[in-house]
């Protein structure tokens, strides 16, 4: 493989890594914002984490992690429905 091809591959790899990091950062910001909004809504409604968790068929730990912004994937649909 010639040096030009390697340089192009390195450049493409770096762009992909940069994009991946940007997506992860943005997802983390979205999850943190969603967690803050969930907590504010839950507290305004007078609902305990345990009660929301039971209604959403998840553990209270899941609710707590979402509210802290420490949950990397989308919340379970059962929790969203609850």
Image (spheres, rainbow, N blue to C red):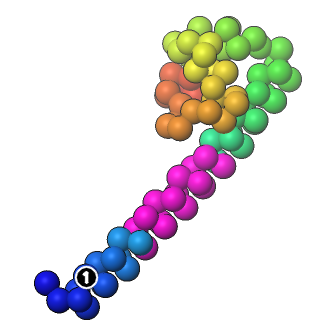
Q: Is residue 24 above or below residue 58?
A: below
- Counting from the top left corner in percent of width and height, residue 49 is at 70, 14
Label 1 sits on a secondary structure element that is helix
Residue name at image x 71 percent, y 43 percent: 33
Judge whether residue 81 is colored magenta.
Answer: no
Asked if residue 18 lies in the magenta stretch, the reply is yes
Which residue shows up at 86% across the image and 23% down it? Answer: 44
Left or right side of 40 for 57: left
Residue 65 is drawn in which quadrant?
A: top right
Q: Nearer the viewer, residue 52 or 18?
A: 18
Magenta stretch: helix, strand or loop mostly: helix
Q: Quadrant of residue 14?
A: bottom left
Which residue position holds label 1? 6
Residue furthest front as drawn: 3
The C terminus lies in which quarter of the figure? Answer: top right
Q: Position of residue 5 (x, y in %)?
A: 23, 86
Task: Report the front residue among 27 and 41.
Answer: 27
Whole-percent x, y for residue 76 in the image: 49, 27
Q: Position of residue 57 (x, y in %)?
A: 52, 13
Res 53 quadrant in image: top right
Quarter of the image where the N terminus is located: bottom left
Residue 72, above or below 55: below
Instruction: Tell me where the magenta segment starts and ends, as one range.
Output: 15-29
Q: Is residue 82 visible?
A: no
Q: Which residue is at 56% across, 12% downward?
A: 59
Task: Return the residue nearer the eye: 74 or 6.
Answer: 6
Left or right: residue 54 versus residue 37 is left
User: Does the rendering let one see residue 20?
Assistant: yes
Image side of residue 14 versus residue 58, left or right: left
């Amino acid at each position: 493989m010639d040096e030009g091809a390697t340089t192009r591959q390195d450049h493409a790899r770096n762009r992909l890594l940069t994009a991946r990091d940007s997506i992860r950062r943005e997802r983390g910001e979205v999850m943190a914002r969603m967690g803050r909004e969930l907590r504010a809504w839950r507290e305004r409604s007078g609902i305990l984490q345990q009660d929301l968790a039971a209604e959403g068929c998840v553990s209270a730990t899941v609710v707590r992690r979402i509210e802290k912004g420490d949950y990397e994937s989308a919340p379970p649909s059962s929790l969203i429905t609850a």
